[in-house]
Amino acid sequence: MTTTTLAQVRPSRQAATGAFVALLARDLAVLLKTIRAFLLRTIMQPLLFVFVFTYVFPKIGQRITGDFSTLIVPGVVAIAVIFQGIQAVALPLVQDFGYTREIEDRVMAPLPVWGVALEKMASGAVQGILAAAVVFPLAAFIPVSTVHLHVNWPILLTVVPLAAYLSAALGLFVGTRTAPQQVPLLFSVIVIPITFLGATYYPWGALKAIPWLKWAVLVNPLVYMSEGFRQALAPQRLHMNLAMIYLALIAYSALLTWAGLSGFRKRVLA
Amino acid sequence: MPATDPADDRVVIQTQGLTKVYPGDLTAVDQLDLAVRQGEIFGLLGPNGAGKTTTVGMLTTRVIPTSGRAEVGGIDVVAHPTEAKQVIGVVSQTNTLDRSLNVWENLYYHGRYFGMSAKASRAAAAEHLERFRLADRAHADTATLSGGMAQRLMVARSILHRPQILFLDEPTAGLDPQSRIALWEILGELHAAGQTILLTTHYMEEAEQLSSRVAIMDHGRLLALDTPDALKASVEADTVVKVTTDGDAAALALHLERMEGVASVNVIDGTVNVNLKGTGRGVLPRVVEHADRGGFAISDLSMREPSLETVFISLTGKDLRD
């Protein structure tokens, strides 16, 4: 065995950028390896949802108002995106902190600890965007009644990444604060209420009939995602104020990023 | 601090007053001063809970010191963790292999994290698979590796980016004896190639076999630091005789302490350890005779050369095993 020459120490910014990109490349490689599982977990719920509500219900004569399909398409896309935050970011982290401790190695890559967490969010956000891209055609083409979508591209192209990032940040926050044995609880206490009370199956404005609920659901970040998608896809309806949607999406992203990063730091550093 | 003494240039790990107090006032490492020289295998020996892992945690940027300084390769680990991480390789106590990647990919992506080009990383991965006898498992799932193979892969991965210093935390804990010896050989080869290694262990044979110098730790403090031979010489005994009695062990210890040539006596788990001068056949009869004269009945007796465990016992009055 010969004496090895030692690696040169690179400036921290250069090293950190390289490590960040390499970690992202690793995550995408893993995503490609497991693309079938990704598609299954991404498609299954929206597929069944769209199938039952917009195909089965009309066929069996359940009364559903005319453009129900149009109304729920944005909600279904929003759910698909927020689920990626849980599935691509939170659950792997829970497993990592709880059992495998693989994260201990990833943290030894030459970038700050928050950089590792940021990369987790970036890769989760990419998966959220992919999920939106996969689910959108499903939701738009399966329903029996015509879906009247009028795509507002500037809104769509800004809301999708924002929503995907917010979901990933939520995933980081939840993932750093959940013990493995709490995962079933995570679904019943966080995921299910968020999706049912996220203005997904009805526009937020329709809640004017139940004023207390209309205001209470505003703590739910999914409301702004659903409403954002609704603005982007079905603008003929009276929706939440667009500025409020953007403001809330950005504010929630910032808050969850901060809480997620500090949670990550606490779990990784002693 | 400018290095004037040429020997100082070769210090690659340095700590000054390094201290870690965990919440709840638990002092894991207490005012630790260490200087590890380039090319050494430096052993941190101590029982579980001695502060070894916390020390390695601080040196590898994972544990934030409460006070004191720590440098690796001349880089302050607290002020510049991203630079510090580039000069170290770490094998932690638990299996931290990337379970989503196969064996080859574990090496390849590690190289990429550390800024190697795709080509260089591919070449390094192939070279390390060969060198660590993992080439036939290149495309295997890491979950299918045996404990020994997983450990070899962790070591291969940790040195892939050619770090100045390699840290191994209890590298052979949980390994079968054969894999342990295989790992010792690997570390020996790395040492021969000039790799600086800091390893923690609670196996005294491991520290003794591998280390150029050994630091003995207990309760977060450094108790002794020297070459294994010098540490053993510090006991000032040639032989350790373990004596078990049916009677009062403490009384027997007191009695044997007065025997000629005895350097020191400890009682560990009801067994009397007598460190004494002299070797060979005459030793055991002398002990038996002396015990007999004191009216003690001996039920078991053995002798061996002093080891690092003897050193630990004479420093702390307790066994390395917990």
Image: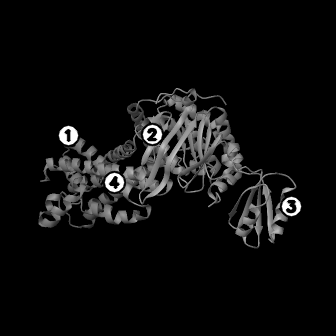
Q: Which mark is residue A173?
A: 4
Q: CA distance from mark 1 to mark 3?
A: 95 Å
Q: Nearer the viewer, mark 3 or mark 2?
A: 3
Q: CA distance from mark 1 to mark 4?
A: 29 Å
Identity, as a three-letter code, of the amino acid under mark 4: Phe
User: To which residue does mark 2 refer?
Assistant: B77
Identity, as a three-letter code, of the amino acid under mark 1: Pro
Residue B13 higher or lower than B25, as above or below = above
Q: Secondary structure at mark 3?
A: helix
Say which quarter of the image contains residue B321: bottom right
Q: Residues within 10 Å of mark 2 (few under 14, many from 20)?
A: many
Check the residue under mark 2 and report the chain it is in: B
Lower position in the chain sequence, tag 3 or tag 2: 2
User: To which residue does mark 3 refer?
Assistant: B285
Tell me, yes or no, whether the two marked residues, 4 and 2, touch with CB atoms within 8 Å: no
Q: Secondary structure at mark 2?
A: loop
Q: Which mark is residue A154?
A: 1
User: Could you say where residue B259 lies in the image, as x and y percent from the top left?
Assistant: 78, 60
User: Could you say where residue A262 lies in the image, as x and y percent from the top left?
Assistant: 34, 50
